[in-house]
Amino acid sequence: MKKIISVVGARPNFMKVAPIHKAFQKYSDKINHLICHTGQHYDAKMSKIFFEDLKLPKPDFYLGVGSGTHAEQTGKVMIEFEKILLKEKPDLVLVVGDVNSTIACSLTAAKLHIKTVHVEAGLRSFDRDMPEEVNRVLTDSISELLFVTEKSGITNLKNEGVPEERIFFVGNVMIDNLTQHLEQTNKLPTLSDFNVEPGNFVLVTMHRPSNVDSDSQLKKIVHMLNSIAGKRKIIFPIHPRTRKNLESRKLIKSLNDNVILTDPIGYLDFLCLLRNAELIITDSGGIQEESTFLGVQCITTRKTTERPVTVEIGTNHLVGDDFEKAEQLAIEILNGNKKSGQIPELWDGKAAERIVDIISDKLLN
Ligand code: UD1
């Protein structure tokens, strides 16, 4: 029996490991697939609710690391994950995405000569000020197999000298997860709970330090939201970091009544809102992909994107960190000037199956 440990840490990891765990069940007589949760995200609304919504089993290992500076968080994950690896001696470690837990666990495994595979490899924003970019570059450089979601990833990895035989263009596991759960969202009361009509509201998420840690950017965000709220109701599920910063600067109260603030919400409710939104304004990575798949207009308030296919052929618009520009574009979109989009190659709901087949072939033969 072979043993694989997959790592989850922060919110965007759960929906990527869920379809992989499901796909591994096909090999359950030969491969024991275990899940380690580092505890980078620990609030029920940032973590537990995803296990429930996605029917992920309780993690086999929980490291309870929590928040801290980048070094503290990464260091604590490494110390705790090393203990698990020494005891469990897995044949392979699987990491997803680009959060601190991703680099911490791949580095720990590499130091113990345990092979790592990276799902969602090769994405590059070329902005090393983003902690995620550093995590991506480093994780890719020490991973054995690199599973790529879009073709730009192949080019980026080849440019960094990665041999072709380690790169696999397999599609997007987050889209697998989305297609597996889309139907369930039909029955949810989410829209009536928020008192909104399909196709007639704006959804907003904002959590990147570059946007929400500075006074001036936060004030611009509030101005943008209040202006758009004159035209449409806005639903804003708010990340703990963003809430803390808005509260400490006493900006929360200056938001218009048409901006509905809520705590972070679970996967299914969020998917229901996303598929029914007229427009989403976000600085997230994954939401750029989900909105492109669903054909929903998306304004990304970042200078760069590591997911260029969403701008090139999808419904994503990149506006930089310029919230006036975001506001103008939002108004244009709400006035009917919408971009048409296509679904990127291999975003067909079968990426996890491809990944698991490739891993099994390498491990078992
Ligand atoms: C992390 C990821 C980011 C991802 C995001 C999704 C890194 C470097 N960043 O950023 O790529 O897009 O998750 O949310 O790994 N907090 C809570 N409760 C929680 C988790 C966090 O209150 O359950 C608060 C804490 O004050 C913490 C802060 O949020 O210090 C930031 O959390 P952290 O995990 O460091 O980074 P995120 O900003 O969530």
Image (cartoon, grey):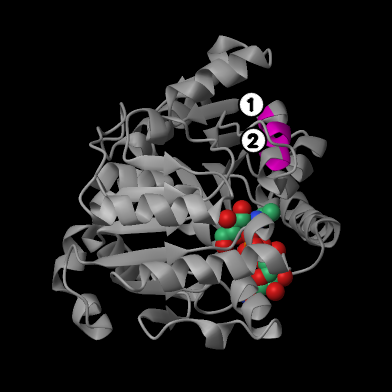
Residue 184 appears at what percent x and percent y? Answer: 19, 65
Q: Residue 185's spot in the image, x, y percent?
A: 21, 66
Q: In this rendered view, identify the residue nearer to me: 326 or 129.
A: 326
Badge 2 local density, few (<14 within 10 Å), some, or many (20+)?
Answer: many
Residue 210: x, y in percent? 68, 55
Q: Which SS class for mark 2? A: strand
Amino acid of disc 1? Glu
Residue shown at the point (22%, 83%) measured from the top left: 195
Q: Residue at x 48, y 28 (%)?
A: 148
* Crowd class of label 1 (few under 14; some 14 to 19; many from 20; radius 10 Å): some
* In the foreground, 146 or 310: 310
Residue 18 in view in this figure = no
Identify the disc placed on residue 219: none
Is residue 277 rendered magenta in the image? no
Residue marked by disc 2: 116
- Asked if the residue under mark 2 is in contact with the one under mark 1, i.e. CB atoms within 8 Å, the reply is yes
Q: Distance from label 1 to label 2 (Cα)?
A: 6 Å
Decide: is 21 above or below 353: below
Disc with the residue nearer the chain's start (1 vs 2): 2
Determine which residue is flagged by label 1: 144
Overall secondary structure of the magenta stretch? helix
Is residue 136 part of the magenta span, yes or no?
Answer: yes
Can residue 348 be seen by looking at this rendering?
yes
Q: Quadrant of ligand 1?
A: bottom right
Q: Would you identify the image quadrant in which residue 146 lies?
A: top right
Residue range corresponding to the magenta coloring: 134-140
